[in-house]
Amino acid sequence: MIKDTAPSHDGFYMPAEYEPHEATIMVFPERPGSWPHGAKPAQKVFARIIREIAASEKVCVAVNERTRQAAKEMLPEAVIADQELLSGAVNENGRIVLINIPTDDAWARDIAPTFVRSRDGSRVRGINWRFNAWGGEYDGLYAHWEKDDAFAPEFMRKTGYEGYDAGDFVLEGGSIHSNGAGTVMTTEACLLSPGRNPHLSKTEIEDRLKAYLGAERVIWLPRGIYNDETNEHVDNVCAFTAPDEVVLAWTDDKSDPQYELSAACLKVLEEAGIRVHKLPIPKVPVTVSEADLEGYVFEEGEDVRETGERLAASYVNFYFTNDAVLLPQFGGENEMSDARAVAIMKELCPGRRIVPIPARDIILGGGNIHCITQQIPAANVIN
Amino acid sequence: MIKDTAPSHDGFYMPAEYEPHEATIMVFPERPGSWPHGAKPAQKVFARIIREIAASEKVCVAVNERTRQAAKEMLPEAVIADQELLSGAVNENGRIVLINIPTDDAWARDIAPTFVRSRDGSRVRGINWRFNAWGGEYDGLYAHWEKDDAFAPEFMRKTGYEGYDAGDFVLEGGSIHSNGAGTVMTTEACLLSPGRNPHLSKTEIEDRLKAYLGAERVIWLPRGIYNDETNEHVDNVCAFTAPDEVVLAWTDDKSDPQYELSAACLKVLEEAGIRVHKLPIPKVPVTVSEADLEGYVFEEGEDVRETGERLAASYVNFYFTNDAVLLPQFGGENEMSDARAVAIMKELCPGRRIVPIPARDIILGGGNIHCITQQIPAANVIN
């Protein structure tokens, strides 16, 4: 692990998610406090997503002794190999690789390395941030996160990727977006939360982002999605679709608590000269039902759910694969909202398949498609 | 206004609330987005509280052109006088003074000066913090707070109190408690919120508290009361009852979202060597009803309420007067919880009257008895 320099000093930067991927990292889910009913409904959606991604890039799925069997049953085409993803290896579409690394939960976006690429496109390296389950002792979502925190270095060790160690700096991948052209987006709500890096001022945090992600500018959106238990990650509220264009979760209903949050973000984006496409949230709030609640098993120190609790449902939590956009859909009374989101994304991403994924079984875990995926940019690409 | 030194440099410190008061400051309520049904139910409770305080100390009630008439009708014994509270004046029990100062709402705790006293007890001065409606552009509760922000200097000007100006440092009185003996208590959730002083690190914020409040130690409770829209002010979750003793809002119900918050505070207090008395929260959550909701009138940019929303009801938001504890009561299904709180406070404050105050009409506004009062410590007291 490289500790004495940061990526930008070595000419590395974080590409945009819509640039070519070498592969995608995921984790097969099981945690009883996140995934109700023995995680079976979640595992089915994860398997569906893995296959959709594998249509255009390699997928590396972390499993443990218990989930390995379920993953093999649901994905019989998967191979088991711990060193399949050697840095710089030629991309091999359609390959699903199971890799043995234990985790505390299944949020690859937040626990896997954030990958950066050299300016000449020849090399890709990972970054190991400190992970504290979205807030540690302050407001973290579970009491033990040692395995999650160890995931990034273990992944790089097993697959041969070089990596930077960011020391004691706490960050999750879902709290940042890069346009690959010098601009990084984040939220004040998350990065300035007392549960992350309270010993650093806002300016010091911004300097770290620039040094590690190779950016010249940080756009600080004030807020994220209402009731988002990640302290309002940017990846649920706003995403780049082009270097100076974003989609922003939106509602026109001023009596919805999301209104003020999105309006505050819009103001900042407009002042930053970014073109904003509004992507309306589901019209009917997505909530936890009694039947859902019975399916969870919470452990000591874990954040609990309540019946009627509003989930942080947003269409912005999509994922770009090499040929598609995997877009969350919430179904039921939100069929019209779902269809509108598909239409907006189709308009904005003319070159890609828009793949609607029924995502209620993922949002019950607290995140969505973007939260359970992490891209490894392709090396050897002429920019 | 003194700008070049801080109180501790001049030998001033913030006494404990249970030390003798010269007077209490309040504001007569009217804001339609805080106080449903024309603020009438709230005004009645405020009038009741003003009289209970006046039993043992002077009360200074800020009014404007509109509320002045209502205050005079409900408090016919009140006198109108803008300069009744000259610093060092002899205390005159039973005197209710109306003073003309416009405000945006009625939270005296957060907009009035925080008063400090010289170590020899001879002088009392105020501190003018910057006020931004609990979060400003980030997550403030209303869009205009100019009058509230101007309240503290205007109060000191009209009443002749000397004052310190804390510059651009944002702080509300409800976010701090002092034991008058070198220790100040606050919450990370509030003071480290992105809506307060994000340009300062935790250490820099702690240094300001010590310099302005004359403290040697700051106890950082991580959290406050669940769903507290002040970003979890300390005065709703924990209060000193003696220099090394506190009451802490508590629940034994691990499925209640308050459990983790209170447990985290307990851990910090025990590590700090503080004796903790648990003061259980209402057994049945206090929520906003449809009838309540119809009574509010929200303006553009103001935080809205929803039916069923859980209010941050806690018995810790009491107020010490010179002879009493004014204790919130929530009634209805919480009669037993109410009675238990009275019994606990009676045990802890043997020398004072415990005065139960039906407080549902105050909590609907977003705070409670402590939030609508601010003490001016008595001068000329030999410590």
Image (tube, coloured by chain):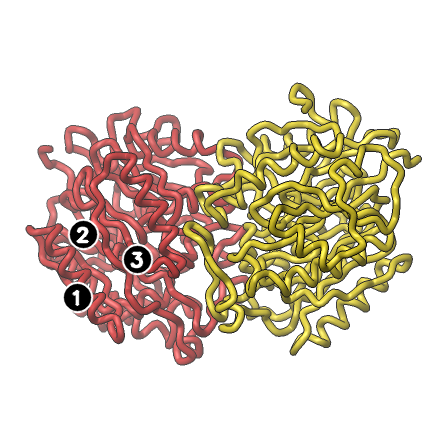
Chain colours: A red, B yellow
Separation of residues labelled 3 and 2 (CA atoms): 24 Å
Q: Residue furthest left?
A: A351
Quadrant (top left/top right/bottom left/bottom right) for the N terminus of chain A: top left
Could one spot residue B170 in this view of the protein?
yes
Instruction: Kindly identify which residue carries mark 1.
Output: A339
Q: Residues within 10 Å of mark 1 (few under 14, many from 20)?
A: few
Q: Could you tell me the amino acid type at mark 2? A: Phe
Which is closer to the viewer, label 3 or label 2?
3
Separation of residues labelled 3 and 1 (CA atoms): 16 Å
> Quick check: marks 3 and 2 in contact, CB under 8 Å?
no
- Going from the N terminus, do you reach mark 1 or mark 2 first? 2
Residue drawn where x is 83% and y is 48% of the image = B95
Front-most of residues A144 and B58: B58
Instruction: Kindly identify which residue carries mark 3.
Output: A251
Front-most of residues A288 and A69: A288
- Identify the mark at residue A320; answer none if there is no mark: 2
Could one spot residue B266 in this view of the protein?
no
Chain bearing mark 2: A
Residue drawn where x is 52% and y is 42% of the image = B145
> Dot 3 lies on which element?
loop
